Amino acid sequence: MNSELVIKDLRVSIEDKEILKGVNLTVKPGSIHAIMGPNGSGKSTLLRLILGELRPDSGEVIAGSRLQIAYFDQQRELLDPDKTVRENIGEGSDFVEVRGRSRHVVGYLKDFLFPPERIDSPVRILSGGERNRLLLARLFTRPANMLVLDEPTNDLDVDTLELLEDLLADYDGTLLIVSHDRSFLDNLVTSTIIFEGDGRVGEYVGGYDDWLRQRRPPPEPGLRKAATAPAVRPPPPEPARRKLGYAERRELESLPRRIETLETEQRRLEEDAGRAEFYQQEKPAITAALTRLEALNEELQQAYRRWEELELKEG
Ligand SMILES: Nc1ncnc2c1ncn2[C@@H]1O[C@H](COP(=O)(O)OP(=O)(O)O)[C@@H](O)[C@H]1O
Ligand SMILES: [Mg+2]
């Protein structure tokens, strides 16, 4: 049941340089975190610790028993240049499993802007942008409930950037995304993890802009030009920390409609299933309807829980 990730007092030095000095984080299932900080501050190192590729000097990374991580690393996840696009993604099969659905590679790759005539080309002749798209396509076929992306937006063309943003917004697992692209992240994330220098890491609710607001509240406009303003103004009060990030608020707003849609479908299917003719259909049709009904119940339970959770958090 548990797909949480907990990081406890993680410390690591590389060649006598302290990269992480006691980092604590809890990554809840379904949450979306931006990881930001200057080059060389330790972002990729933190990801490698999470992935178990690097051992800390002290502290722990505790992965829940159900946690399954897939990793996007532009430097290292190599495509086989002599194999075709189709072979690189399907690994011999023409079907891939994406979010519990079996998809034909041709249709799936179309989503990633590969025309059917392109998919039997060897990867060798693809442009850099096409290779990025293929890597992304492959990432979403990995069985995982957490995606870790290290600078996924580097070298992406605008179309692929938009595609990636949509895919991430629709993704229902947990996301950890290292990126310098603030506009990309601000629409998406529930929290921002910032390398603040000196091996310290802070976590803030919302996107980078929220972080800026939390750190440096703007002066009140009325005070700025007032002749009576005291020479030394008291520091402005800390603004209340936003309880819901942008993405969460958007989610909360969309939940009632989503629940209504699900309930309508559920009602319709239940009515169908209650009719005498229902069991006179072909067996696959019966199975499909009953499976869908079961999935709907589960989705609804999840939606109710999430609604409650967000309502409570908003206070
Ligand atoms: N294999 C390595 N050998 C030596 N130094 C390294 C190695 N990996 C990382 N570092 C150092 O650790 C620091 C953090 O690197 P990294 O985690 O890659 O930063 P970021 O991803 O934030 O740019 C850097 O100062 C880098 O020089
Ligand atoms: Mg890096």
Image (spheres, rainbow, N blue to C red):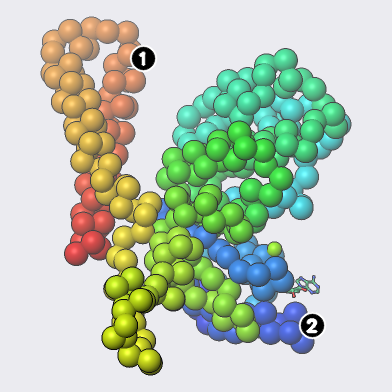
User: Residue 3's spot in the image, x, y percent?
Assistant: 44, 58
- Quadrant showing the C terminus: bottom left
Q: Is mark 2 within 8 Å of ligand 1?
A: yes
Q: Which one is in front, 35 or 210?
A: 210
Q: Quadrant of residue 61?
A: bottom right
Residue at the (60%, 84%) spot, across then down: 21
Query: Foreground mark, 1 or 2?
Result: 2
Residue pictured at 28% horizontal, 42% vertical = 254
Q: Secondary structure at mark 1?
A: helix
Dot 1 alpha-carbon crowd within 10 angstroms: few under 14, some 14 to 19, many 20 or more:
few
Mark seen at residue 15: 2
Q: Which class describes the residues within 10 Å of circle 2: few (<14), some (14-19), or many (20+)?
A: few
Quarter of image, ligand 1: bottom right
Q: What amino acid type should be assigned to the residue bearing mark 2?
A: Glu
- Residue receiving disc 1: 284
> Could you tell me residue 282's position as x and y percent?
32, 8
